[in-house]
């Protein structure tokens, strides 16, 4: 594992032992096969991903950094202020994932620009759906499931309150699971969002005792159906549903 950020700066002589090219991106050879598989899987669904801007040497990162600082200083900033502002646009040398060979940019053939518009593309939605981690915007989920954001928000609130999801606001925000997909049963989720799965009101959680229960000829039938419903839904996890998707791969690169 190689970590590069402002708290963990790579040494100036850091190099990637072996690289490989996937699309237009040069990357650490260890991730090349997984990256190619992801591109191929997306293509099978009609989404044409385009890996670009991969490995960048620390020397090259230094050049980009110096150029950005120079431009800001020419705009009137002091060197100290320019270096502080430059971080908004360019990573300092040794602090970028690109320097490790494990970071890259992904665009699509129909939207090659690296701008905010990419978030609205089919490629961005495919990546969000198949990412192993990360926050997925409410809008993306609503569009994928063809339901209104307002309705989805009411469901999301319940799941966040129950700590089944966690959310982050602002740019790059959205929602994600708090546990592994295998730890969520469909039954747990439906009981949380629907209050009850009971086929009749007398079997709902917290229902008052029915005065006719002792003589009810259908009670055993409803109890049996209630058990069948819950047992069936509790057999399946989110992971099972993910595996039902022919293109349902998760990628960790």
Image (cartoon, grey):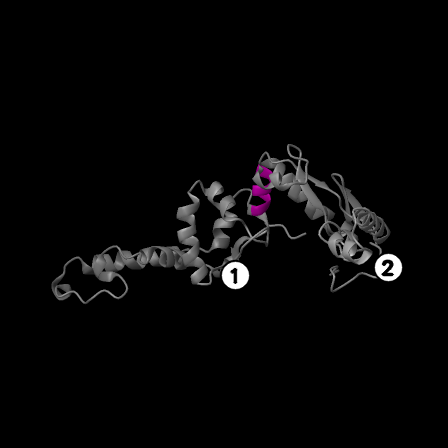
- Residue under numbered circle 2: 12
- Residue under numbered circle 1: 178
The image position of residue 85, as x and y in percent, is 74, 53
Q: Give the left or right position of residue 163, taking residue 216 as reference.
A: right
Tell me the quarter of the image containing the N terminus. bottom right
Q: Give the left or right position of residue 177, taking residue 191 as reference.
A: right
Classify 83 as above or below 32.
Answer: below
Q: Earlier in the sequence, mark 1 or mark 2?
A: 2
The image position of residue 49, as x and y in percent, is 65, 38
Residue 249 visible here = no
Q: Does residue 173 belong to the magenta stretch?
A: no
Range of the magenta residues? 122-128
Task: Using the image as rendered, state which of residue 226 and residue 147 is in the foreground.
Answer: 147
SS category of the residue bearing label 1: loop
SS category of the residue bearing label 2: loop
Determine the CA span between mark 1 and mark 2: 37 Å
Task: Using the image as rendered, state which of residue 232 and residue 48 is in the foreground.
Answer: 48
């Amino acid at each position: 594992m190689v970590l590069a950020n402002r708290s963990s700066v790579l040494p100036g002589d850091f190099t990637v032992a072996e690289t490989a090219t996937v699309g237009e991106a040069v990357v650490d050879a260890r991730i090349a096969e997984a990256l190619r598989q992801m591109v191929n899987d997306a293509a099978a669904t009609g989404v044409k991903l385009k890996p670009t801007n991969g490995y960048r040497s620390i020397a090259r990162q230094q050049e980009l950094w110096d150029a950005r600082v120079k431009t800001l200083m020419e705009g009137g900033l002091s060197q100290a202020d320019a270096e502080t502002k430059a971080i908004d646009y360019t990573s300092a040398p040794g602090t970028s994932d690109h320097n490790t060979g494990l970071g890259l940019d992904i665009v699509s053939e129909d939207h090659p620009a690296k701008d905010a518009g990419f978030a609205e593309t089919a490629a961005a939605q495919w990546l969000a759906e198949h990412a192993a981690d990360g926050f997925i915007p409410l809008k993306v989920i609503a569009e994928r499931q063809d339901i209104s954001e307002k309705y989805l928000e009411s469901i999301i609130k319940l799941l966040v309150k129950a700590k089944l999801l966690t959310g982050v606001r602002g740019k790059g925000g959205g929602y994600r699971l708090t546990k592994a997909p295998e730890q969520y049963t469909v039954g747990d989720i439906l009981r949380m969002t629907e209050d009850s799965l009971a086929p009749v009101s007398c079997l709902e959680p917290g229902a008052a005792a029915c005065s006719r229960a002792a003589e009810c000829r259908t009670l055993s039938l409803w109890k049996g159906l209630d058990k069948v419903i819950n047992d069936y839904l509790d057999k399946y996890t989110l992971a099972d549903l993910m595996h039902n998707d022919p293109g349902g791969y998760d990628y960790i690169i």
